[in-house]
Amino acid sequence: MRFRFILGIFFCLGSISSPTFSENVEALVVTECGNCHALEEPHYEQLTVGERVNRKAPPLFYAGNKFNREWLVSWLQNPERIRPAGYFPPAHVIAGSDGDVVDEGSLPEHPKLANQEAVNIADFLMSLTPYSSRIDEVQYEPGSISWKMGNLNFGKFNGCDACHRDAPDYGGVSGPELYTVWERLQPEFIFSFISNPVAWDPHTLMPHKELNPGVVKKLVDYLKVNGEDEE
Amino acid sequence: MKSIKFLTILIGLSSVTFSHADGDVAEGEKLYGIYCTQCHGVSGNGKGINIPDMSVLPRDHTDTGEMSARTDEELAKAIKHGGKSVNKSVLMPAWEGNLNDEQVADLVAYLRKLCCKK
């Protein structure tokens, strides 16, 4: 009887004890990041493509399947723009007679974090891995490709440069820059996303071109070679 | 036999007309704003934010003459299977994996409004 009483007190104290460190970090992420980033998978089947218009920033609920941790820690402390026209480009465009231009003033700045905060948040985000099985299915071994051949494959043959920059001063601006992608993202994620972007995000602006694995490999190898050249 | 032939023709016609006549212009406008304006421009004039480094400029969808020369089926084909499928630039991607037939029909309906109903 006495044992049960003590055990009862123990459980009560446990339930009202202060949150753990990881709970604190999670609460911080929910508060600070959740306003712009999706931290849980949206119910896409119940949503129309119109939801894409209202998104402010990339979803983070699969961050651990996507990012390279070291890059994430560094970027959170010095967040430089990756998408020249913002996350939803049409919201940041001014029409002009000579062509549309990006309304730079409308692009939001990402908060800059202190070192420890960046480490804590990156570690928490890297724990979000709902699509690990999808990543595990990827059969990609980084290989080599001549820069010239890879560049032709990227631009002339597949038209990726219509939306993406593969150099700081060349390419389209509606998609994220790709000359830093090798540093930013996990190779298996890059491969999987190019193979089927719609599986990752049903309302993505990236066309699902149903490329065969050989073509995807050439593209990913080019992003590697090109990224290493940029460093 | 006659009635079977008539039915076949009727089914054929209905499948052709679905790709354009049933398109919803308002939905098409919404989709155009999401997927197309980056290259074709917010006004549809072919001068989107992506054009400065493009080797081939995107189609000006407000050009009545050029657009009138294209059938609805050709427009739908270009959207679904990309520019290459209609002997145009590879810079126009295939959207078949992102958009369903109804959405493509909506886009075609909006393109017709954009080009030719001023």
Image (cartoon, coloured by chain):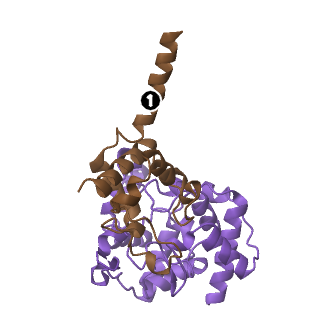
Q: Which residue is mark 1?
A: B13
Q: Which chain is purple?
A: A
Q: Quadrant of residue A45?
A: top left
**Chain B color in figure:** brown
Q: Residue at x 66, y 77 (%)?
A: A151
Q: Residue at x 42, y 29 (%)?
A: B14
Residue A140: where, in percent of width, then height? 72, 64
Residue A205 position, x and y percent, is 45, 62
Residue A139 visible to an observer of this rendering: no
> Residue under mark 1: which chain is it in?
B
Residue located at (45% from left, 59% from top): A204
Quadrant assignment, res A101: bottom left
Is residue A97 something that shows in the picture?
Answer: yes
Report the front residue among A112 and A127. Answer: A112
Q: Give the residue type that dot 1 points to.
A: Leu
Q: Return the residue found at the far bottom.
A: A231
Q: Secondary structure at mark 1?
A: helix
**Image position of A86 (left or right of B81):** left
Residue A104 screen position, x and y as percent: 32, 83
* Foreground pick, B71 / A28: B71
